[in-house]
Image: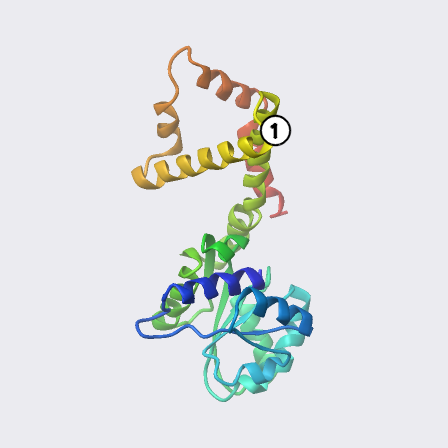
Amino acid sequence: MGGALVKGWYAASAQGCHVEEDDTLQLTVTARSQSTLDRMRSACPGISTSLSNTSALTSADVVVLAVKPWLIQQVIQEIASALDARPRLVCSVAAGVSATNLQQLFHQSDAAVEHAYFYCMPNIGAEFQASMTFLSPASGTSPADLARVESLFSLVGRTQVVDDHLMGPGMMMAGCGIAYVMRFVRAQMEAGVEMGFYPRQALDIALQTMEGATALLRATGEHPEAAIDRVTTPGGVTIKGLNELDHAGFNSAVIRCLKAGLH
């Protein structure tokens, strides 16, 4: 996820996008191994990299902790004192590590400065500036700080600011959901092959069909069922296919799929 964000922000910077007016986006990436940093520099030429988390923080205004959840405490213990020069915006991209958790962990590490804390949940579409990112700030966060973090993540897609209890459902719908959408694309592709298309043709058809459906719903604001009625005629082939989905429990399967990770 960290790599996807870096590549998306790098692309946004190359396009001349700014977090705020005249606020140039400057990225510094850290990692445990030089080989990881070499790969990032190859993908994003000119980017700043470092093997030291603390040295990378010197001029940072926003710190994004894109590590596995079980590493978050270790990283915070390492960087807490280095951040104390001035207040920063600190974002957790670690699943399940909320803004409140961040705040508590920094306090346990004897942080001398109160930072602004955020729980941010993007998806891998960030690499192509097509993420759906959910943001949940710690209580007491200023509107200006929230606006800046929202602007930053808007560079890699769309954002929604939600209450903390909706971060899990958001992750299932968008973070995990991107895999479920791909599974539907794969099924549509396999059906296309069975009906006579070559695999690459079938994939292109499936992807373009999904783009068309998305474009229609965004442009019109219609409920999906109203849009379905546009292409469903009495006695036609579309209703036959829709009824097969219903017979197979399609809606129920999707709902159960999205709720599965909440238990």
Rendered-image quadrant of the N terminus: bottom right
- Tell me the crowding category of disc 1: few under 14, some 14 to 19, or many 20 or more residues within 10 angstroms, Cα based: some
Q: Between residues 15 and 166, which one lies in front from this camera angle? A: 15
Q: Quadrant of residue 238?
A: top left
Q: How is the image coloured?
A: rainbow
Question: Relative to residue 219, is residue 7 drawn left or right?
Answer: right
Q: Between residues 120 and 111, which one lies in front from this camera angle? A: 120
Residue shown at 65%/73% (left/top)?
A: 73
Q: Residue furthest top?
A: 235
Instruction: Estimate the x, y position of residue 15 in percent, counting from the top left.
Output: 38, 63
- The local secondary structure at tag 1 comes to helix
Residue shown at 58%/20% (left/top)?
A: 195
The amino acid type, in three-letter code, at marker 1 is: Glu
Look at the picture and state if 82 lies above or below 104. below
Residue 12 in view: yes
Instruction: Estimate the x, y position of residue 9 in percent, counting from the top left.
Output: 46, 64
All told, the count of numbered labels is 1
Look at the picture and state if 48 lies above or below 212. below
Residue 136 in view: no
Look at the picture and state if 147 lies above or below 260. below
Q: Quadrant of residue 77?
A: bottom right
Look at the picture and state if 201 lies above or below 233. below
Instruction: Estimate the x, y position of residue 72 in percent, counting from the top left.
Output: 63, 70
Q: Between residues 104 and 160, which one lies in front from this camera angle? A: 160
Q: Which residue is mark 1?
A: 190
